[in-house]
Image (spheres, rainbow, N blue to C red):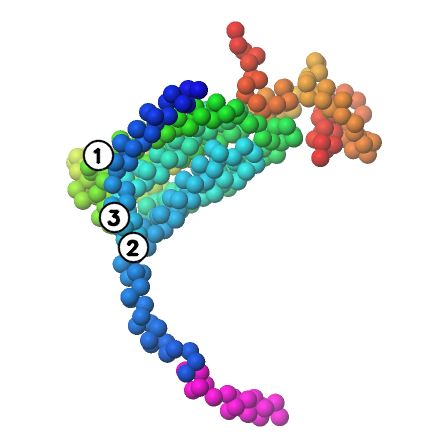
């Protein structure tokens, strides 16, 4: 019901976005890749992760959404760090972006380990991984 | 005897007649530059390939209901992301992405899927109103992010294509506190910091996380029966696996649970 109300707004916003974005004005096979191409991929992965986190009821699905979000952020860090993708005269993060992306990968591994342990504990106690049934702490 | 036979066979084969059947190779090669292969930037082609794989499988993770398929799609999406890292010149980071994410984190996730994949939990379907709301929110967020990304002129230009130096050694030196990489243009004069302290913090953090995860996931003995034990006792178990898994004294909870895992197949 809410989607029917919001659908025209969504279509209008997408149309304005695509109108401002000259995606296919050039041949994508011959044009060199820039930072903004990587930002596009990062935005899609980030959005997919957010949608995964909000949509899934399986706790492991929510974990996968978090991994996707962290990967989208990592793609942006790598794109801003790359001297290959840098446009003429634009600044670049240099090696710092890669270092931050490395830390993000490590912290994502740690987060996955702890969240998986919590999920297994929840499964042992409740015999389900449905997060809608994790309401023991609800006041 | 056999050598003479071979020679006769070679003499019998007249290769000059083949040129009448197959068009000459030189003519074929001369026709190649007329094809649109000539001006193709192979870096862009590989980028489009990996970007399409990463985006498509990321959307597949959202669209799939089966948790095993979601894990498989996530493997492909993260692997394609590693390819994007290689294309951007961050080869050490791409290798770390493959080793830590695809090799470590996802094995962990797949183990979690396998440990919790009882039949009704494999695919928990969200309601259709949730799907609609998520589609609207996702499209709005994506349009916002794309408009923001394409609105900065410094990011829109094509890359100048400076092939970067190998980044493994500068990364390792930066992690132990010494910067040996070339400072990027526009960096103010002065020393740049290394990453010794964050490296130490992350290493201690990983140790604490490993201890904490092992503590959280350990097998506990319970006084009150858990719902999973009720499930296990209600389920008929064949006598062989029961005799193999139930310990003699005091281990009925753990034995019943492993009987549930073994008997659920």
Q: For residue B6: magenta?
A: yes
- Residue holding disc 2: B41
Check the residue under mark 2 and report the chain it is in: B
- Residue holding disc 1: B152
Hey, which residue is sitting farthest right in the picture? B239
Mark 2 Cα-neighbour bin, 10 Å: few <14, some 14–19, many ≥20: some
User: Residue A107 placed where, x, y %?
Assistant: 43, 30
Q: CA distance from mark 2 to mark 3?
A: 13 Å
Mark 3 Cα-neighbour bin, 10 Å: few <14, some 14–19, many ≥20: few
Check the residue under mark 1 and report the chain it is in: B
Pair 2/3: label in front: 3
Please give the label number shown on residue B134.
Answer: none
Q: Which residues are magenta?
A: B1-19
Q: Secondary structure at mark 3?
A: loop
Residue B7 versus residue B239 in the image, above or below: below
- Residue holding disc 3: A26
């Amino acid at each position: 019901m809410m989607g029917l109300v919001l659908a025209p707004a969504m279509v209008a916003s997408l149309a304005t976005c695509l109108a401002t974005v000259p995606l296919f004005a050039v041949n994508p096979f011959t044009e060199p890749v820039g930072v903004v191409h990587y930002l596009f991929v990062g935005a899609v992965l980030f959005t997919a992760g957010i949608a995964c986190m909000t949509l899934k009821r399986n706790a492991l699905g929510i974990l996968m959404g978090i991994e996707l979000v962290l990967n989208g952020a990592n793609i942006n860090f790598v794109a801003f760090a790359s001297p290959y993708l840098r446009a003429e005269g634009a600044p670049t993060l240099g090696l710092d972006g890669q270092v931050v992306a490395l830390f993000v990968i490590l912290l994502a591994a740690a987060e996955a380990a702890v969240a998986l342990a919590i999920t297994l504990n929840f499964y042992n106690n409740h015999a389900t991984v449905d997060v809608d049934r994790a309401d023991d702490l609800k006041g | 005897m056999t050598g003479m036979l071979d020679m006769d066979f070679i003499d019998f084969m007249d290769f000059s007649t083949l040129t009448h059947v197959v068009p000459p190779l030189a003519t074929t090669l001369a026709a190649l530059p007329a094809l649109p292969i000539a001006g193709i930037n192979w870096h862009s082609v590989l980028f489009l390939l990996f970007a399409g794989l990463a985006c498509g499988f990321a959307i597949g993770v959202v669209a799939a209901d089966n948790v095993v398929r979601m894990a498989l799609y996530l493997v492909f999406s993260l692997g394609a992301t590693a390819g994007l890292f290689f294309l951007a010149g961050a080869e050490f980071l791409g290798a770390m992405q493959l080793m830590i994410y695809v090799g470590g984190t996802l094995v962990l996730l797949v183990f979690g899927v396998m440990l919790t994949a009882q039949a009704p939990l494999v695919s928990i379907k969200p309601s259709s109103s949730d799907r609609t709301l998520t589609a609207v929110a996702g499209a709005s967020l994506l349009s916002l992010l794309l408009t923001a990304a394409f609105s900065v002129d410094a990011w829109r230009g094509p890359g100048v294509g400076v092939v970067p130096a190998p980044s493994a050694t500068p990364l390792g030196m930066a992690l132990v506190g010494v910067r040996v990489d070339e400072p990027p243009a526009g960096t103010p004069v002065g020393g740049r910091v290394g990453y010794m302290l964050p490296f130490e913090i992350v290493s201690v953090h990983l140790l604490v996380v490993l201890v904490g995860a092992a503590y959280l996931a350990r097998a506990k003995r319970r006084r009150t029966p858990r719902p999973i034990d009720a499930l296990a006792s209600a389920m008929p178990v064949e006598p062989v696996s029961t005799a193999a898994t139930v310990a003699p004294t005091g281990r009925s909870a753990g034995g019943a649970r492993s009987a549930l895992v073994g008997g659920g197949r």
